[in-house]
Structures are given as structure tokens and as C-alpha cells.
Image (cartoon, grey):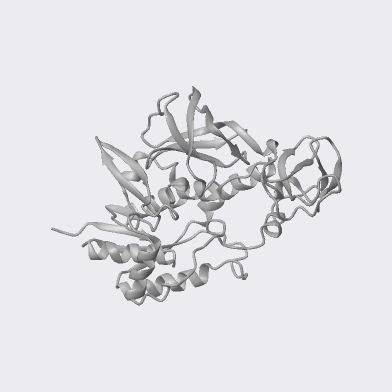
Amino acid sequence: MSKQRVVIGLSGGVDSSVAAYLLKQQGYDVVGLFMKNWEDDDTEEYCSSRQDFLDAVSIADVIDIPIEVVNFSTEYKDRVFSHFLTEYQAGRTPNPDVLCNAEIKFKAFLDHANKLGADYIATGHYAQVRKVGGVFQLLKGEDGTKDQSYFLYRLNQKQLSSTLFPVGHLYKREVRKIAKELKLPNFSKKDSTGICFIGERPFREFLNRYLPHEPGEIQTPEGKVIGQHIGLMYYTIGQRQGLGIGGTRDGGDAPWFVSAKDMDRNVLIVVQGHDHPSLFRPSLQATDLTWISGKRPHCNWVYAAKTRYRQVDAPCAITNFTQDHCRIDFAQDQWAVTPGQSVVVYESKVCLGGGIITE
């Protein structure tokens, strides 16, 4: 009986490297696949794809698995980056990693892996899959500080049924320990924190290459002008750094935070103090809903939700369902709810799905 083939996305990072090793130890026929998805200014210092590729090849050699390279840069630009730019231009703050997972890592990649005869695909994400009564569930990773289910909430049943997350049951420290014991050259490589496939680079400079910016006034909610912004697309709700304004005599030295963007007037609204009332919301509206099971959750059921990665689960209820819209009411007001970001809903450790915040 031939071994089942698993095609794993080898990024050059420690998580996917250890995942590949674990799969081979479990008896799978493992093939590494390095995805190149960004070509613009790829020679610049901020894009690490060349070094990541060299790391991935080195890892494949140590683990003794074949590795292939595939270029999805066209798919990335068409399916992810164009949406990314459209959202920023509309004044929203998108999460490209969410769309990148749904459209590239678990769609274009899955399609390519099937052509290579894969029974499964695998990644180094900290998440888990469980089958219950014929339905595949997406579970949080065991390491709560590294859980990445938030970025995977748009996956569907077909994608989950074909996916393995070999490090999802491990803690990050255990993954690094395994890598060190194996003498993998990247055992201490730091985690990537940049935009999916684009890398870590000065964001304003990068965005300015693709979108025209229009400076305007920074105002308080009362209409007092206290500064100038360089373009609304560069700011997000709850932002503190990079506003270019200090304290005021009547407000003391409390830091300023972005509380709203008035797109019609091209005005950035700011308030003083992290706990200013206008930074909190008792509820939100969401659209572009995706439910992993294929069925929406029960109305008014008590769940928990995240409006940003690494946020503590916030108890909530889902109401006002339509086919592609819902309202989420929180037990406690939530800070800096941001249009364009994803709200992801959980029932204990099970990720149910979510949608895009509209207001």
C-alpha cells in the first residue's frame, strides 16, 4: 500500500519546518512547496522571499524531502492585493492575511497540490481540525498565545477536510525545541510579522506607491482643528503612534487616539485618552459572512468573538441575521472596533466563522 502524499507549504520558518518533519515521522510521503507570491520590488531589503526560499531549501535537505517552487504572484495580486488597496482607499482597514489564507494558501495552493497527487495539504499554522458527525470543525491551536484560527475563519468544509495542521497541538516552545534538537538551521529564526507575502517594510511608503493620498485636517469631535493628517488611508481606529500631535493645555498630556474617519470631509477625528467613551462600542455590524459548517449559528446564542488577532474572547450574542449580514452585541463594550477588520466567532475552542466589520 502506497503512502498518502502530503504537500506542505514550506515558508522557511520554523513552524512549517517542524510540521514537515512531524509528517514524515508519521509515515506520509511529504513534498515541500515554497510559494512565491510577490514580485514587485522583490530585490529590496524589506522583502525576505529570497532568504526564506534558501531557508526552505536548506530545511528540505535536512529533513530529506523534495521541494518545489510555485509562483502565485498573479493570483495574489488579483484575489488579495487589489481588494487590499480598494479597502484602504475606502477608508477601511483590511486584514490581508485572512484573504490570503482563503484565496492563496488554501485555494490556489490546494489546487496545485491536487495536481501533484496530494491526499492532503499541510501548513505550520497553530490551529486544529476535528471531525464531528461528518462535519469538519476548525479548533483553536493548543498554544493560546499563538492560536491562528482567527486568520482561518473563511475556510470551508472542502478545504478543512483536505488540511493537516501538524503543530496545532504543540506550544511554540516545543516547536523550537524540536527544531533545535534536529539542528534545523532556522530553529531560532524570528516569526514574520509583516503583511502576508509582502514582508516587513515602512507601511506608509509602501502604500503611497499604489494609492494617491490627500492631506487634510485632524479635528476633535467638537470640530477643533489640532493638526494635519497626510491621508486618511494611513490611519486606523485606535491608532496612537504617528499622529504628529502632542497634548493640549486643556487635555493635559494624555495621548491622542484615532476615533473615526470622516471620508466625506477628509477629516481625521481624534480623542484624548485610551479610555475615551467614543473609542468603545457595545455592538457591531458585519457582512460578507462565512460559516465553516456551512450553516449559520443559532440566533441569540451566547458565543464569544474577537474583533482583532490576539484579543481576549469577548462574550457576545449574534442577532439580526440576514443571508449576508448580522449584528453582534457584546456583554462589555469593545475598544476600537475597526471597519474592514474581521470579527471571528467562537463556541468554546471551536471557530464558527465570521465576517467583515462594517460599523
Residue ranking furthest to the left: 1
Q: Camera-side residue: 278 or 52?
A: 278
* Residue 86 rendering spot, x and y as whole percentages: 64, 43
Camera sees residue 220: yes
Left or right of residue 253: residue 31:
left
Residue in the picture at 47% in, 42% down: 313
Q: Quadrant of the N terminus?
A: bottom left
281 over 208 or under it: above or below: above
211 over 340 or under it: above or below: below
Residue in the picture at 62% in, 38% down: 339
Q: Camera-side residue: 238 or 60?
A: 238
188 over 221 or under it: above or below: below
Q: Camera-side residue: 49 or 279?
A: 279
Camera sees residue 115: no
Q: Camera-side residue: 249 or 111?
A: 249
* Residue 351 rendering spot, x and y as whole percentages: 40, 40
Image quadrant where residue 174 sits: bottom left
* Residue 312 rendering spot, x and y as whole percentages: 49, 45
* Residue 279 rendering spot, x and y as whole percentages: 67, 39
Q: Quadrant of the C terminus?
A: top right
Residue in the picture at 48% in, 69% down: 52
Numbered disc total: 0
